[in-house]
Image (cartoon, helix red, strand yellow):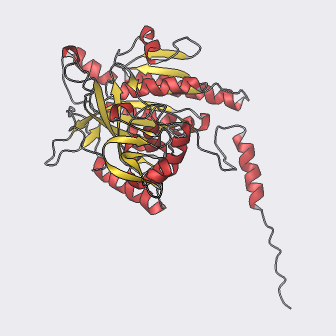
Amino acid sequence: MAKQKKEVKKFEFSKVGSILDNISKNIPIQIEKEIKEKQFITTGVYLLDAALSGKLLGGGVATNRITAFAGESGSGKSFLCYSCAKQAQKVGYSIIYIDTEQAIDLEDLPKFGIDNSLEKFRLIRSNKVEDVNILLTQLIDDLKEQKIAGYELPKIMIVLDSLGQMASNKEKADLLKGDIKQDMTKAKALGSMFRSINTDLGYLDIPFLVANHTYMTMDLFPAEKLRGGNGLLYSASVIGFMSKSKLKTGEEDDMDLGQSGISVLFKTAKNRLAKPKKIRFDISFAHGMNPYTGLDAFCRPEYFEQIGIAKGKEEVDKKTGEITFTPGGNRWFISHLGKSVTTKQLFTQEVFTQEVLEKMAPIVNDYFRFKSLDEIEEVEKQFNEMMGDEEDDTNGFTDAADADDIFG
């Protein structure tokens, strides 16, 4: 007699989903059931937004990730953090700013366009890794509890300026004893801090900006590395390296020491949102950041038909009346204005209107867009090889080389 097969009961995956939903009511885990549109906060510079996010319009700093600005002293890291804080406040964010360098006072913030009222800004001073770790861990844990309890949280951005200036309790204790020793605890403490908050920042939709110094290795072929070990390297979704050269406008006087600001060379070394490319933007000592600087790199003759801006002039054939564009010269022809301007007159809202920016967006976005998953993996591999895996943080940092031409 044939043995009767035992009926197999099926436990559908939809029931697994129900189990997960019940679990998520009690612990702060994220279960994403639909594709969410990525949200960004502008930096205040269109081309920098594109370099960080792959989007010329509506791009910038991701609202649920760690973004790091790294570079030599005076390369504009803090200024960029101020600009992001200003832009974040415009769209409803309040700022928690952790100053480890005693570099900014509340009374100075309005000069950068930042609302320094207690409802919009909290300035915290500490340079101890352990203290900042406890602060952030407890703050984010309390916010998670409030979210689980059903409260709608305020929009918050956290800024740490800067990571490189933080010390550990051991370092201070050694100095009080008169000892100068290599401190191996700082890198581990920083790694612990980023591991403990990274995923929770995503759960709470909190953007976290970190400014950090870099140093040059003493190798045969020196490489620029982040200070503070590899905690930030692994946790940050985007890391941008910055170096500077003098900005000269021709209007400097003896008090300007030969420059009116700095020209920043910026390259994202780690980024899953946009292909790492070099860009340049300017920071004026008098006027801050011009949102349109750097866009001239895409105003090329081959794009003139689409964008309507390039070096050259339009000529009319007297016989046929046909208008043709002839590239060349030093002046920029602006099609929608019907006139030419100098480079000094180029970076204005009159030239780069919303309509022009919308025409530029597909070209710029394609320039920064990853074409395949293989490209993303190759970039990550190159980045990891460049950064190495050692925890050594004993070297100082030196000035990075002046910027080369971006598209040369």
Pinpoint residue 174: horizontal percent, then vertical percent: 24, 20
* 37 to the left or right of 129: right
Question: Relative to 108, does residue 203 appear above or below in the rendering?
Answer: below
From this viewpoint, which residue is outermost toward the front? 319
User: Would residue 243 be visible to someone looking at this image?
Assistant: yes
Image point (57%, 24%), residue name: 90
Give residue 226's quadrant in the image: top left
Pinpoint residue 351: horizontal percent, then vertical percent: 46, 35
Image quadrant containing the N terminus: bottom right
User: Would residue 368 be visible to someone looking at this image?
Assistant: no
From this viewpoint, which residue is outermost toward the left? 220
Image point (34%, 24%), residue name: 284
Pinpoint residue 209: horizontal percent, then vertical percent: 45, 31
Count every numbered label the image shows and give the total.
0
* 61 to the left or right of 248: right
Pinpoint residue 328: horizontal percent, then vertical percent: 31, 49
Image point (57%, 38%), residue name: 202
Nearest the camera: 293 or 370? 293
Question: Relative to 119, does residue 355 appear above or below in the rendering?
Answer: below
